[in-house]
Image: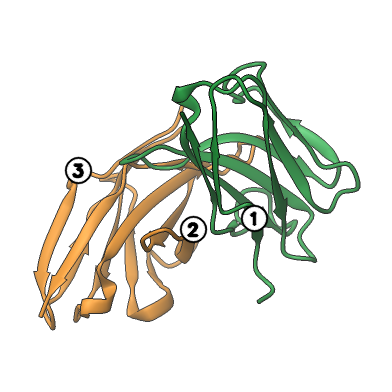
Amino acid sequence: AQSVAQPEDQVNVAEGNPLTVKCTYSVSGNPYLFWYVQYPNRGLQFLLKYITGDNLVKGSYGFEAEFNKSQTSFHLKKPSALVSDSALYFCAVRPANNAGNMLTFGGGTRLMVKP
Amino acid sequence: DTGVSQDPRHKITKRGQNVTFRCDPISEHNRLYWYRQTLGQGPEFLTYFQNEAQLEKSRLLSDRFSAERPKGSFSTLEIQRTEQGDSAMYLCASSSSGLAGSETQYFGPGTRLLVL
């Protein structure tokens, strides 16, 4: 069975500084990897995904993520954080060969960007 | 707004009552998913439809949970004989038919259920 770990419950960063939100995964075979963001009382908004190809994936709002197969990681990054980036971030995985189509999510990381 | 919509946004019910939630997917999407999210946790997959066919339902939490998508458009999730442990956010998502698994799932705003 697949799993996702987000080792940090909360990440604090000053506005303008780079941010990283960590994600590691476990899956049989090749992974499809996703990042979503959730604002208070809202559903999840898609940020970016890795399917195949270039290990560096660029997404919405200036976010990017790097797929590292040897470390089974898919960390989310942004060069310069904004206060408005403060939210809950979820990493998700599904195996490329799984017909069930379900996403398995990590527990989430709360990002706090301070002015 | 042409995104995924869910109704109601909030539901308060008493233990033992039945509740039904509705999800309207993005119009051109033929796949529809239900997830449950409890406080402080990531979403947990419940079930999945392709058109009107329910292709995965083994993750429904108990036989009190059921879902339908009768015409391949909107879907309903019903919880019978609700329990306090059912209190959670119920999220719906939809996607198009891409390379299976690679397509993006787009989420609705969720229905927050509180069972008293």
| Disc number for residue A91 | none
The image shows residue B63, relative to residue A109, as above or below, that is above
Give me the C-alpha separation between circle 2 and circle 3.
Answer: 22 Å
Q: Quadrant of the N terminus of chain B?
A: bottom right
Q: Are marks 2 and 3 on the same chain?
A: yes
Q: Residue at x 84, y 37 (%)?
A: B53
Q: Which mark is residue B6?
A: 1
Q: Amino acid at mark 3?
A: Pro
Q: Kindly identify which numbered label has been placed on residue A7.
A: 3
Q: Single out the mark in the foreground, 2 or 1.
A: 1
The three-letter code of the residue at mark 2 reads Gly
Residue with the mark numbered 2: A43
Q: Which residue is nearer to you in this view: B65 or B59?
A: B65
For the residues labelled 2 and 1, the Cα–Cα distance comes to 10 Å
* Count of numbered tags: 3
Query: What letter labels the chain drawn in green?
Result: B
Any part of residue A103 in sight: yes
User: Judging from the image, what secondary structure is the residue with disc 3 in?
Assistant: loop
Q: Chain of mark 1?
A: B
